[in-house]
Image (cartoon, rainbow, N blue to C red):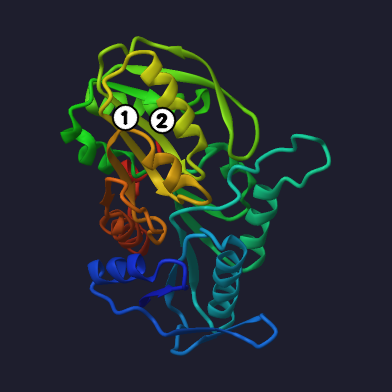
Amino acid sequence: MELTVFTGRANPDLANLVAQRLGKDLGKLMIEPFPDGELHIDVQESVRSHDVYIVQPTSPPTAENLLEILLAADACHRAGASRVTAVTPYFGYARQDRRVTGREPVSARLIADLFYASHVDRVVTLDLHNPTIEGFFSTALEHLSAIPILASAARNCNASIIVSPDLGGAKLAERYGTLLGLPVAIVHKARLSGEEVSVQAIVGDVRGRRLLIVDDMISTGGTMEAAVRALLTAGCDPAINLAATHGLLVGSAVKRLERLPLQRIYLTNSVARPSHGSLPVQEVDLSSLLAEAIRRLYEGKSLGELLMRV
């Protein structure tokens, strides 16, 4: 069975790096909009009996990038592919895993159903905001983690404590702490809106200590800004470091973070890099991790240590 790697338009640079590590050229997939905005997708080579991997994060513009991978998967299935795997390093809608007001969709469940309806046999993703949404998928899901390679990259920042910016990230912070041999502190927050949060308390002693604040993503930067300001008030070392798998940096995120005394921000290339102004970003490459996962799936081997363990 032949292995074929395609990419959508969300992050072709990452897909090309993954294909190179597998000793492959990217497959020929044409994606173009019709004048009315509908997408036209055409698989321009034979994939009959192939093991197909489509590398496409569902990052902003989320709806368009999501539709691209769903249509591409359906096209490959109808063209006779033996198996179609969606490699979505960043999985959008993972935060919408429940109803808050009672009149909302459970969007994460609906998106999972759309992958199944599009004949995706397996989804490969990284560091989901809520790992429990794996239960929403009728198709198989491989939940990988970039935490080990991020922790390795961040080792040189000489942090003396790991900090989770909210209670929900405590387990993730504990894994960083285990890998780096450091204690963990937790910031308790209350969300006021989609961009604004308020810090209620800090659990752990951060006075005089150099911090590595970790999260699964940085979106608008509101959580990070509130956490950093509270930690500075608590007397931490002013040279602060951040690490996150997904650097969306949407809205006013760059301006928010530029106002903070940040020494380094460690982000992977799970999404195409938005402009980050003067921010001290160090990019951590995921291509070797994704290529190894694809190679093991293709060869029928265990993913083992590549999987998320929090």
Count every numbered label the image shows and give the total: 2
User: Is residue 117 left or right of 167 when viewed as pictured?
Assistant: right
The spot of residue 294 in percent (x, y) is 35, 61
Residue at position x 60%, y 74% in the image: 71
Residue in front for this viewpoint, 127 or 242: 242
Mark 2 Cα within 10 Å, few/some/many (few <14, many 20+)?
some
Q: Quadrant of the C terminus?
A: top left
Quarter of the image for residue 50 reads bottom left
Inter-mark Cα distance, 2 to 1: 7 Å
| Marks 2,1: beta carbons within 8 A | yes
Is the residue 2 above or below the residue 244 in the image? Answer: below
Residue 172 numbered tag:
2
The spot of residue 76 in percent (x, y) is 53, 78
Residue in front for this viewpoint, 304 or 99: 99
Residue at position x 36%, y 77% in the image: 2
Is the residue 78 above or below the residue 208 in the image? Answer: below
Residue 226 numbered tag:
none
Check disc 1 and report its element: helix, strand or loop: helix
The kind of residue on which mark 1 rests is Tyr
The kind of residue on which mark 2 rests is Leu
The spot of residue 78 in percent (x, y) is 59, 81
Residue lying at the far right in this picture: please name it. 103
Quarter of the image for residue 299 reads bottom left
Mark 1 Cα within 10 Å, few/some/many (few <14, many 20+)?
many
Check disc 2 and report its element: helix, strand or loop: helix
Q: Quadrant of the N terminus?
A: bottom left
Q: Is residue 252 visible?
A: yes
